[in-house]
Image: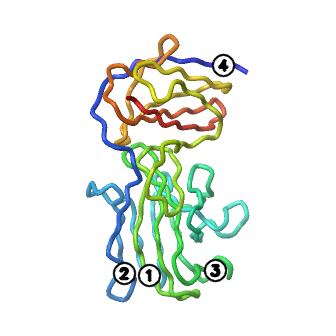
């Protein structure tokens, strides 16, 4: 195994707080007069996707840009287009089953009985792109129960750190939040100037994001990351290994 220590020279930038962005909307209940709901997760005026009641709540999308945690898969022959209800605390990440092929449905007539959304609150897991970066989010819905139960959208949220996981119902980021398919160590953390990176994986790429989800272009040099010229705050280092595993670490600059 190859141990890697990398140096990145970063440009300075102003920093906003990394966070879970929550849209706590007035309850939207689908009905004959309320048939369409548009999701704008980051409030930039661009709709990520829409839910529409066409004799049942459904959504149509470009699967390269948007997808939803599904109850089954194409390979299994069932459920790739059936949205899966999630309980609070369920992890939504690149390890989740996103297999919808451009359309997905809540409680379609072909859904198995155990895939029908239960009465009360539950969550839908989603991923979508903002610009060129992928984000994970949740949608809180309520159902009156049964295959024909009325669906209400109550709130939705996403992690504004690209490629970072979120749990259903999560509204804040803790100090140690990170997403890891393989182990990467950085030290010291927090730092005032230099940071070292170690991993036993061969790395294919490293990207550094600010808290707005913007990627910082960096050059690989020598053996350390120089944060000395950067403002105090939170930064995220995202790693992709040669076998396409991903890991993200939050760094505190003091």
Give the number of the disc on residue 54.
1
Q: CA distance from mark 2 to mark 3?
A: 21 Å
Question: How busy is the neighbourhood of tag 4: few (under 14 within 10 Å), some, or many (20 plus)?
Answer: few
Q: Is residue 17 above or below residue 254?
A: below
Q: How many marks?
A: 4
Side of 87 where 63 appears, left or right: left
Frontmost residue, 54 versus 84: 84
Q: Are marks 4 and 3 in contact (CB under 8 Å)?
A: no
Label 3: which secondary element: loop
Q: Which residue is mark 4?
A: 3
Q: Which residue is mark 3?
A: 110
Q: Quadrant of the N terminus?
A: top right
How far across and down, in percent of the image, does residue 138 sit?
48, 62
Say whether disc 1 or disc 4 marks the residue closer to the N-terminus.
Answer: 4
Q: Quadrant of the C terminus?
A: top left
How far across and down, in percent of the image, does residue 15 sit?
31, 36
Q: Is residue 121 above or below residue 239?
A: below
Q: CA distance from mark 4 to mark 3?
A: 50 Å
Q: Is residue 112 above or below residue 11?
A: below
Q: Which residue is mark 2?
A: 35
Instruction: Name the mark nearer the viewer: 4 or 3.
Output: 4
Task: Report which quarter residue 233 is drawn in.
Answer: top left
Q: Residue at 34%, 43% (x, y): give it.
A: 17
């Amino acid at each position: 195994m190859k141990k890697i220590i990398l140096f990145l020279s970063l440009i300075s930038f102003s920093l906003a707080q990394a966070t879970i962005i929550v849209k706590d909307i007035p309850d939207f209940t689908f009905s004959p007069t309320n048939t369409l709901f548009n999701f704008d997760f980051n409030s930039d005026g661009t709709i990520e996707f829409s839910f529409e009641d066409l004799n049942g709540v459904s959504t149509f999308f470009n699967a390269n840009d948007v997808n939803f945690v599904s109850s089954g898969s194409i390979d299994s022959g069932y459920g790739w287009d059936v949205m899966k209800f999630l309980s609070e605390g369920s992890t939504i990440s690149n390890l989740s089953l996103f297999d919808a092929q451009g359309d997905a449905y809540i409680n379609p007539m072909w859904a198995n009985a155990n895939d029908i959304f239960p009465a009360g609150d539950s969550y839908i897991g989603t991923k979508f792109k903002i610009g060129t970066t992928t984000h994970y989010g949740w949608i809180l819905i309520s159902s009156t129960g049964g295959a024909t139960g009325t669906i209400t959208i109550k709130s939705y949220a996403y992690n504004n750190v690209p490629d970072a996981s979120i749990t259903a119902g999560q509204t804040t980021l803790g100090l140690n939040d990170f997403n890891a398919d393989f182990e990467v160590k950085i030290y010291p953390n927090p730092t005032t100037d230099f940071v070292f990176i170690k991993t036993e994986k061969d790395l294919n790429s490293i990207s550094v994001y600010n808290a707005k989800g913007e990627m910082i272009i960096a050059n690989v040099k020598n053996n350390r990351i120089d944060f000395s010229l950067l403002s105090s705050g939170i930064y995220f280092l995202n790693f992709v290994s040669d076998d396409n595993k991903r890991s993200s670490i939050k760094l505190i600059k003091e």
